[in-house]
Image: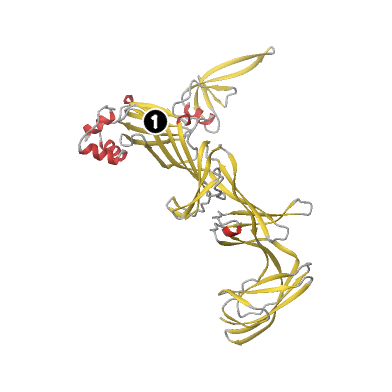
Amino acid sequence: MSTLTSRYATGAHHRASGPVARIRNLLGASLTAIMLIASASPIAAQDVLTMAIGAEAQEDLMVTVYNNGYGLVREVRAIELPDGIIELEFRDVAQMIDATSVAFKSLTSPGDVGILEQNYRYDLLSPATLLEKFVGREVTIIDYRMDDNTSIDRERTGTLLSTNNGNIVQFGDEIVINPGGTISLAEVPDDLLAKPTLVWLLRNDDAGKQRVETSYLTNGMSWKADYVVILGKDDDMLDITGWVTLNNNSGTAYRNAQLKLVAGDVQRVQEEKRYRGQVEAYAMRADSSDEMGFQEKAFFEYHLYTLGRRTTLANNETKQVTLLEGGDIPAKKVYIMESQMWAQAGSAKGAEKRKMAVMIEFENKEEDNLGMPLPKGRLRFYKADDDGSLLLIGEDQIDHTPRDEKVRLKLGEAFDIVAERAQMDYRKLSGNRAEMDYQVTVRNHKDEAITATILEHIWGDWEIQRQSHRERKVDSQTVEFNVAVPARGETVLIYTVRVNW
């Protein structure tokens, strides 16, 4: 084994044959790395060729953005690789890269290119890091003084002793703290980089042009969805437009990239703790005539959206892309008064005034001119005044909403509708059994009739004994009454409930 390992370490041009070579081709870099660790012969520095490859060699780029602050980057670059041992600097990667997620392979000759080591260098060039590298070395201090209105430069050479909370320089027998002037350095150390760089130690057995693929996760990328909804004059139709807002703060730009977005709850593991992150994406309404928009399809248990054109995500940029468009969607305005959950079933309650919430609901279905998976986001509702100007009338949020689901959103609370709820009687029938009479009065000061939905939350084992309006049991703790209220009039709901607890 030592002979085989030594041959790779010295960059020999011939290939191994037989069973060992076949196993190595199957296992790739992993087997080679194991053999190098087991070998007593280190790789000599003079046998390693250093090369660099930047974004100018990029042939393809794909970016997938997730909503909880990260993205997946996959890119293909072309490079002329000699055979032997190569230290390849892969530049222009994201500054916020997750180094543990990096994958590298040759698309041209995967069986001949193996990874011996993988490094992520992020000791970036800055005044502070540059000075730190010169501690214990000579530096030149250039200061300026005036002599007869003439500026005279003075250079002094000393040894930089420390950069901790200031610069300390020794000039001969004199030690000066924070000497005035400009510090001049002779060079930039090789281990300081202008940008974060991935570095691979590769073994290549096939000299020539290679197309190499790299993928990694990076933090600093996110999105959010926003919807603009225009409510019709009679509150029974709406138009909806959605936007994708992409944020790229990952530390690099992605030019001419294919953009993909994933909608769903994707689980990730971080620091040995599992959490379920909300991973959302955006979907433009698919139109067969619009090949520039997002095309949606099911992917595993999520939804995948691919933009039909390439785009550029600049660093520290916020970009908005059309999400969806739908018009003439049937809508319904609903007034709802919801009581609080009883804290204790066996206690008497007094009178209370409750505000009437104004809700808009619509069906996310194709026959209503919608019918697409709606990612989580905020919806802002507008309505036109008589002069045509749009006014904000409320906003709410939706969670991930599949097609054919009903959407109900709260816009605000009604100004001209008043609800008053009172417990009229309380009768204790036994130690854990009681009957209560309730009265809900709805006063409508509008010029048109309305239907008010009254949601009553009841704790315990309950049964409605008497009621003035038909009820509907929503769940084990909720009963619903729909009450018609005339214009400029009022309607009184009365019901009796028996409760066991």
Q: Residue at the location (70% across, 70% down)?
A: 451
Q: Position of residue 487 (x, y in %)?
A: 77, 70
Q: Looking at the image, is 8 positioned above or below residue 98?
A: above
| Element on which disc 1 rests | strand
Which image quadrant is residue 45 in?
top left
User: On the rendered structure, is 381 left or right of 309?
Assistant: right
* Residue 252 shows in the view: no
Query: Which sits in the foreground, 257 or 249?
Result: 257
Extreme-front residue of the structure: 289
Which image quadrant is residue 358 in?
bottom right
Q: Position of residue 374 (x, y in %)?
A: 56, 55
Which image quadrant is residue 116 in?
top left
Q: Quadrant of the C terminus?
A: bottom right
* Residue 127 shows in the view: yes
Q: Quadrant of the N terminus?
A: top left
Q: Looking at the image, is 95 positioned above or below residue 182?
A: below
Extreme-bottom residue of the structure: 429
Q: Which residue is mark 1?
A: 88
